[in-house]
Every structure is written in structure tokens, then in C-alpha cells.
Image (cartoon, grey):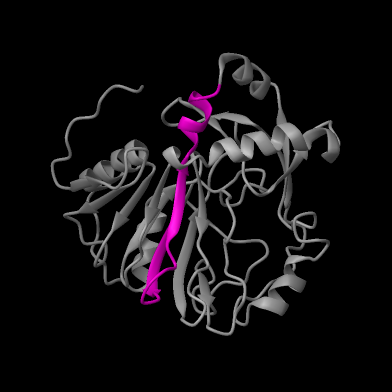
Amino acid sequence: MNAPRPPSRTLQIRKIAGSLGAEISGVDLSRDVSDDVLAEIRAALLDNLVICFRDQVITPDQQLAFARRWGEIHLHPFMEGMPDHPEILAIVKRPTDKKNFGGSWHTDQMFSPAPAMGTILYAKEVPSAGGDTLFTNQYLAYETLSDEMKKIAGQLRTVCVGDNFRAANGLSRKERYARQMSEMKVKDPGNVQTTSIHPLVRTHPETGRKVLYVGGHVQHFDGMTEEESDPLLNFFKAHSIKPEFTCRIRWETNSLVFWDNRCTQHFAINDYPAETRIMHRITVCGDVPF
């Protein structure tokens, strides 16, 4: 299952960091991608966890067509999509906004019973400097634990919450975003499940490798209080984002980045206070962690 893959025949792959991440060239995502090339892209994603395509001039319909090759599209239960393309979340930060979307370590839709398999983010407008995204390799986070800590982690399950009242000092998403973000609109999730319990150690369904599955949506361990959970949970969260596990994507207009939420976390850096950043995000449905 983890045997070395043959070299890509169509794509050129350049690694970004030793831990994860690669830039991919040799494909135009505005066109129909053949099954053979799609297989090469899948292999590159599984090998590198985060892949970046530069200079991709695509429309929302073309981004959706590419995303649908990977599975059904996941609709965010809390955030309103674009009026003409509800499957796409327009992530917008203006100079007057204080908060940015995704500005903490997390993996997308971890609060869902079947979290997102992958996220496809396309840069429409980026600041002159800043606005980068950090990623961290959760295979390495698990594999570098001691054997005894792996045994402990393997017995734990986490309670993951979509509306993170605890970290937000009691404020809901709607209250926070209304105060700090002018164009990101929150909706009522209705009867969509937004609190879920997942194993702290999950197995990647395609590679068979074990992953430390943790992030900002985790509130406490199942069956424990927050006070009981915090010391060990804080250790796992801090361990999972060690610098040697990370890479940094520097955004350019018309860059498209695709990451595997099953084995990564990411963090959108809010360091461009006087400029605008506009991204189009699609998430692909995943499966129940095991």
C-alpha cells in the first residue's frame, strides 16, 4: 500500500518542503483532465498531501467541474455560498475586516460526521505581501510520538464542535463574524449535524497510514471533562504543528491549492491589514474516520 509510485508521466512535481507540499505544472485545469492525468494528480496529492497549481485561469464552473471529479461537493453548514454557485464559498477579507476566515489551526469540517476529504482553494485576489497559508503533516505528528503515547492516543476519541463557543468566549459564529467580517455571511445549519465524535488516531482510507487527527474544532475527549482533557489535548495540539512538520504556501493570483484534510491541518495567516484577499473554496465530501 505504501510502495513507491512510478514517476509522473505528464506532470512536473517540485517539492515545497521536506515534510509536505509540492508545486505541480504540466496541466491546464480549465480543460477536461483525462483519467490518466487525474490519476497522476491523485498520486501527487497522496504523496505530498498539499499540491499547488500556478497560473490557472479558471471560472467557477471550471473549478466545480474539477472538484466533482473527486467526489460530491460538501456544502458548509454555517456559511453561505456564492449566489450563482452555492457550492463555492467566497472567502473575502477587506481592509476594514479585523478577522480572517480560517485563522487558526484546523482541518476542514472536522465537526461533521463524515468530514471533508479535500479542499480546493483558488486565489482570485491576493495582497501584495502576506496572506499565506501554513500546512502541517499529521502522519508525521503521529509517527513521531513515543510508542507509549501512541497507545494512549489510540484509545481516545474527540468531541468536535462546529460553533466553537469555548474558544470564542461564548460568542457564536454569527456574532463573531457580524462584528469582524463584512462579507462572510453566516446561515442557520438547520438539522445538519455539527458536533461529532472521532478517533484521535484515524487511518487514512487510501494510504492505510495512521494520522494524529486533531485541530481547533476539538473541545475535549469523549467521556472526559474539559478540565480533565486539557493537559493531554494541549500537548497533542502543540505537537501536531511543530515547525518540522510544516510547509508554507505563498499565494499568487490564479493559484489553485488542493489539500487532503484527512492527514493535514492548515492555518490562514492574517498579516495584511490594509489589503484585500479573495479566494474561492470548494470542499469535497469525505468519509467517516476510523
The residue at the point 34 percent across, 43 percent down is 45
Splitting the image into 4 quarters, where does residue 233 fall?
A: top right
Most foreground residue, 169 or 155? 169
Depth order, front residue of 229/129: 129
Q: Nearer the viewer, residue 200 or 9?
A: 200
Residue 167 in the image, given as x and y percentages of width and height: 75, 55
* In magenta stretch: residue 154: no
Instruction: Please determine whether, in this image, residue 173 is positioned above or below residue 227.
Output: below
Figure quadrant of the N terminus: top left
Verify whether residue 131 appears in magenta. yes
Q: Nearer the viewer, residue 150 or 209?
A: 150
Query: Residue 116: x percent and y percent?
Result: 54, 48
Residue 137 position (above or below residue 37) = above
Q: Specify the farthest residue to the left.
A: 9
Residue lying furthest bottom: 96
**Does any portion of residue 205 appear in the rendered image?**
no
Percent of width and height locating residue 199 = 66, 31
Image side of residue 18 versus residue 73, left or right: left
- Residue in the picture at 33% in, 50% down: 51
In this picture, residue 230 sits left or right of residue 130:
right
**What span is in magenta?**
119-145
Task: Locate the C terminus and report the quarter of the image it occupies.
Answer: top right
- On the image, the x and y values in percent for residue 288 come to 60, 37
The residue at 24%/67% (across/down) is: 55
* Image quadrant assignment for residue 153: top right
Would you say 221 lies left or right of 245 here?
right
Looking at the picture, does residue 179 appear above or below residue 132?
below
